[in-house]
Image (cartoon, grey):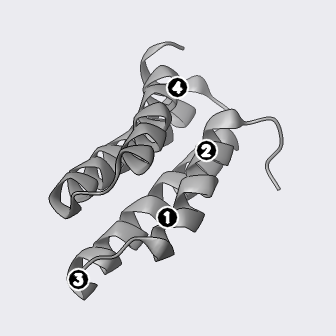
Amino acid sequence: MIQNFRTYDLALRFYRRVPAIQAPTHLKDQLLRAASSIVLNLAEGSGKPTKKDRVRFYAIAFGSVREVQALVDILGCDATIVAELDHLAACTYKLVYKQ
């Protein structure tokens, strides 16, 4: 388990909510893959020894957050999901651009 990494915790919590989101099969599959990419890239990045390597993986995670946001827009998800995802996006953005 990764401890004391708030952005990772937010990403994992969001990923665990994805199965409850109603979507056509092709979009649900894409949503699951993109949401898992956020979690996995944050985890992998946190284990890298240099700032440059960490930021590269965090940037990939941020790109996946944007993909999930687009999918949520397409699906018309409720405001609580959108707000949770916006918070995750802000935290991921900070990892990439505020180090």
Would you name the residue on which mark 4 appears?
95
Earlier in the chain: of badge 3 and badge 4, it is 3
Which of the image's four quarters has the C terminus?
top right
State how far apart marks 1 and 2 are (Cα). 12 Å
State how far apart marks 3 and 4 are (Cα). 32 Å
Residue that sits furthest to the top in the current view: 98
Earlier in the chain: of badge 2 and badge 4, it is 2
**CA neighbours of label 1 inside 10 A, class few (<14), some (14 to 19), many (20+):** many
* Cβ atoms at labels 4 and 1 below 8 Å apart: no
Would you name the residue on which mark 3 appears?
24
Would you name the residue on which mark 2 appears?
10
Q: Image quadrant of residue 40?
A: bottom right
The residue mark sitting in front, 3 or 4, is 3
State how far apart marks 3 and 1 are (Cα). 18 Å
Earlier in the chain: of badge 3 and badge 1, it is 3
Would you name the residue on which mark 1 appears?
36
Q: Amino acid at mark 4?
A: Leu
Say which residue appears at 24% left-offset and 75% top-offset. 27
Vertical position of residue 34 compared to residue 62: above or below: below
State how far apart marks 2 and 4 are (Cα). 13 Å
